[in-house]
Amino acid sequence: MSSISTRAEQASFVVVIVLVTVAFVWLLLPFYGAVFWAITLAILFNPLQRRLEKALKGRRGWAAALSVLACICLVMIPGALILSALAGEAASFYGRLQSSQTDAATILQTFRDAMPAFVTDLLARFNLGSLEEIQQRVVSTLGQGAQTITTSLVSVGQGTAQLVVSVGVMLYVLFFLFRDGPALTSKIKRASPLSAHHTDTILDKFRSVVKATVKGNVIIALIQGAIGGITLWLMSIPAALLWGVLMAVLSLLPAVGSFIVWGPIALFLFLSGAYVKGIILVLVGVLVIGLVDNLLRPPLVGAGTRMPDYVVLVSTLGGIALIGLNGFVVGPLIAALFIAVWSLFTEDRGH
């Protein structure tokens, strides 16, 4: 009877643990982004925190405060400045489209004159037979894209209260993660129902994937965005900052990445008769921007995640589709943990 009572108590306690844990996760959902990025920044800036602790002779609180200040100066302030400039650039580009300052008619007429007859017939089937219809569709598509970017950036500014609260929560949590990180890690290990080997493997995989995904992708994005933006600026392409930032964001996607931006721009240059600029942009895109991706992504991202490129691509796209921009980290992280857990299971079955 006592054994049955003991098992019932244990089962009840497990149920209570699960319910309380689910309730706690549900409570954190409104600020999951703030908590997630606090954990991410704590992992990325952990080497700095350790060096500051040594320099300050073990004063973890002061070291944590300086580490948070470093995150603000190196990440948050530059990000805010870029977003502010991007909002103005997107609004200006949308205004130029609305006022028809771009010579769309000439470009489309040149393109239409060069098309074979069967292509013209095919366009007619899709109600794109006339120049006016093609121009209206193209300008409308570009305008909607620029307006979407502008609206999204303006909505961020309008939600100032929520943004300030989220940033405050992130910085507050980040401070305590810096200060109490080792103690929290040891508590997680002791409380984990998994074996010590399994717990260490999963935690190590979590840290390595976060470092590789964020650090590697951000470095690649900054380099590709900078190269693309500077190239477009030197060629006097309107909204060069906007296209450069879009290249940086889209470079988070392996394989395709920034080509989604510079490819159509190069086509636009060819159709408008700027053949030299189009050739230069294609050469820069293929030989420089593409080379950066091919050379840096395997050692920076692939080596840390230890996943094939196709898994990284699919998990990144799935993560972005489900939860937005945070998905470029969460997606590969879930995929890497999935592979790690099943590898542990296979290892245990082998033994």
Image: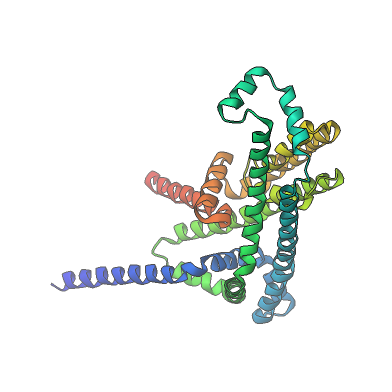
**Is residue 43 depicted above or below 180 in this figure?**
above
Q: Residue furthest top?
A: 117
Q: Residue visible at 63% across and 48% down? A: 144
Q: Position of residue 108 (x, y in %)?
A: 73, 32
* Left or right placement of residue 233 versus residue 177 in this view: right
Residue 289 can be seen in this image: yes
**Is residue 285 depicted above or below 344 in this figure?**
above
* Left or right placement of residue 3 versus residue 190 in this view: left
In the depicted view, which residue is nearer to us: 350 or 247?
247
In the depicted view, which residue is nearer to us: 237 or 283?
237
Q: Residue furthest left?
A: 1
Q: Residue visible at 41% across and 45% down? A: 346
Q: How many marks?
A: 0
* Left or right placement of residue 34 versus residue 57 in this view: left
Q: Residue visible at 62% across and 72% down? A: 160
**Is residue 5 depicted above or below 147 in this figure?**
below
In the depicted view, which residue is nearer to us: 124 or 231?
124
Give the colouring mode of the picture: rainbow
Q: Position of residue 126 (x, y in %)?
A: 56, 29
Q: Position of residue 133 (x, y in %)?
A: 64, 35
Residue 286 can be seen in this image: no
Q: Residue visible at 73% across and 68% down? A: 77
**Is residue 211 depicted above or below 190 in this figure?**
above
Find residue 274 and report its image quarter.
top right
In the depicted view, which residue is nearer to us: 250 or 120?
120
Q: Position of residue 41 (x, y in %)?
A: 63, 65
Find residue 182 and report its image quarter.
bottom right
The N terminus lies in which quarter of the figure?
bottom left
